[in-house]
Amino acid sequence: MTQVALEQENKEIAKQYKELLRISYQHLSDDDKKLIRSAFEVAVDGHKNQRRKSGEAYVFHPIAVAKIVASEIGLDAVSIASALLHDVVEDTEYTLDDIERMFGETIARIVDGLTKIAHLKKDMTTSQQAENFRKMLLTLHDDVRVIIIKIADRYHNMLTMDAMPEHKQVQMASETLYIYAPLAHRIGLYNIKTELEDLSLKYTEPEVYQDIKGKMEESKEEQQEYIDSFSGVIDKSLKEEGLNYYIKGRMKSIYSIRRKMKVQNVGFNQIYDKFAIRIIYKSDRQNEKFLAWKIYSIVTDHFTPNPIRLRDWISSPKSTGYEALHITVMGPKGRWVEVQIRSERMHEIAEKGYAAHFKYKHGNQKEQGIEIWLNRLQEAMENSTANAVDFVEEFKLNLYSKEIFVFTPKGELKSLPKGATPLDFAFNIHTEVGMQTRGAKVNGKLVPLNTTLNSGDQVEIMTSDQAKPNQNWLDYATTARARSKIKSSLREEKKQLAQEGKEILRRKLKSQKINLNEDSINKMVVFFKLKTSLDLFYRVGNGAIDNQMIKDFASSYNNAFISFIKNRIRRNPVPEDIDKDEITSKYDMLVFGKDEEKLDYTLSKCCNPIPGDEVFGFVTVSDGIKVHKKNCPNAIQLQAHYAYRIMSAKWIDSSQEEFRSDIMLTGIDNLGLVSEITEVISDDMHVNMRNLNFSTDGGTFTGKITVVVKNNGILKKLIDNLKQINGIDKVTRV
């Protein structure tokens, strides 16, 4: 590089630095400026011999990221300095200790978080990518600014991706859509989220992107005309009220128009809500709400509103801090148009996210906003032992899901993802409340725990010390937090049952003259076709492996020669991870419908489902129930044309299955008999009753009870215990 070109480049670097200080959204003190200057000098020095793929000096990248952090996100001096230094530890001679010595612990921690993310492999499969995302989220525990700077870093990379090879562009764009856009959305950085989505589309579907972009350019004038005609109608009325405001149109993003075209299956010209109109007004804090509704009143005087499409985020702001009043009205030319009413303060929060929120707070309050958000994310990650892809999917659902607002009995407002149930609400209040949920009332009425809540519902949770999570709760809960707590509780319970099972097995084998040792355990695991020793103990504990089955094993075990021959024939190897500390699910049985009935079925040839797959049943005209995978190529067509013939279906572990059984009792009627019967069933045996029917005639009684039991052994024991009750003559199974 020539001396002249080098001088020119240095001048440009200095110019960019001055620009960075000038555009900072927060007020910078002299100390702040010193901090940023030092960070700038270290970045320039560290990256002095590096160039980007495009050929320009590498240091332009950290400066550009710092500019995004300073102006578009509006964070503080610590964040700006960290952005300048974000690649220093990864790419240069400087170490983390150097950074901590020069800039203190906070900046060192942020830079460390960013370096950790950068160190993860770039050429990843989906699950590695998900794992990367998960690790990135876990760094949040240190400082939310790590994520924000990473989003800014990704945003600048997306803006300057032209020099990269095409496969890298597509990979980076896909990762951006999968991870960074939802995160930006969640933090309330709506502008950056929109840019990330559009830039991703530019590389994943370039023709579509250019086509929509071109059409948007062409319709710009028409759009402006429409906005002018809309403004013309209400302008006079707004001015008469002495309001200080301006109206501007915002074209929807290319990505969101593309999504609408796909969902509605229409062309560009058939999408009518391509833009929204914003009315932004000046106001002090006291009058903001009053003026918003005043403007609403004026707009709806002139244009008919769609009552279903009113969104009041002023009274109940979104959890990102977003506030505005959204209405959809029938505008000029008979077209629905979305109108967003916001004060200048609300507009700033919508554009800048959390950072703008802090501008209006002072001192300690600034920190609280980030704290609340951090805690929310942290909860989703607590106890999450799901594999990484599930984790991301679950988390992504919670990121993108729309929110509903429900009330506690005391009238406090709680925000939950759309689709949440009373069980989610219980865990949202407190883990203990969730764990001890016995039932729920919504708007004063008792409802099932899987009821979908709606905005405005008042929810009351009834608890009991005896209540505890069961397997069905996983079907009732939708939020990541509730599901992870339920899963860990069920795991604990299974382990406890396995402990009891081990003792039962020790006793039963002893009576068969067999010791419970490594050899006998291994042979039993193979004999019962299980995976781990814990599986064996658990299934003995819940009665799935009963006395007779243990006797069958004992006879084959005691007859060592036959057993040896059999094993030679079978050549059954001992599973490698037999001592693994987990209870595996045996997906060996299909059940259908809400009541989880066992029905005859055949597996369809088109997608060959195997146990454990997500499936549904389809009732054919002549072949009974055919089972298809949910992602079977024919599934969408079947669901669209024959929805009424679709049955829900799932694979379950047969040792978890519960059977309904009817018991008939006859005997002599005496006081307290019914309570004695129910005590034996519920308290002593912990069996669930579904139905209870007693009638007396001339001093004798007959009763019919429907119980739910895990297996025949428990039912036999229950019948024996009922026979012991004084006054009971006969107990039979129907």
Image (cartoon, rainbow, N blue to C red):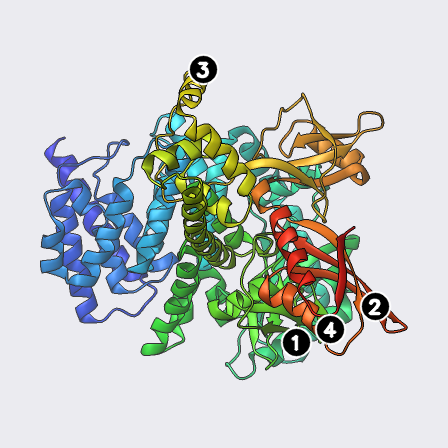
**Residue beneath disc 1:** 293
Among numbered discs 1 and 3, the one appearing first in the sequence: 1
Q: Residues within 10 Å of mark 2 (few under 14, many from 20)?
A: some
Q: CA distance from mark 3 to mark 4?
A: 57 Å
**Residue beneath disc 4:** 673
Q: CA distance from mark 1 to mark 4?
A: 65 Å
Question: Looking at numbered disc 4 in the image, what kind of residue is underneath it?
Answer: Leu
**Residue beneath disc 3:** 569
> Label for residue 73?
none
Q: CA distance from mark 2 to mark 1?
A: 69 Å
**Residue beneath disc 2:** 701
Question: Looking at numbered disc 3 in the image, what kind of residue is underneath it?
Answer: Ile
Question: Looking at numbered disc 2 in the image, what kind of residue is underneath it?
Answer: Phe
Asked if residue 711 lies left or right of residue 33, the reply is: right
Q: Are marks 2 and 4 in contact (CB under 8 Å)?
A: yes
Q: Nearer the viewer, residue 685 or 614?
A: 685
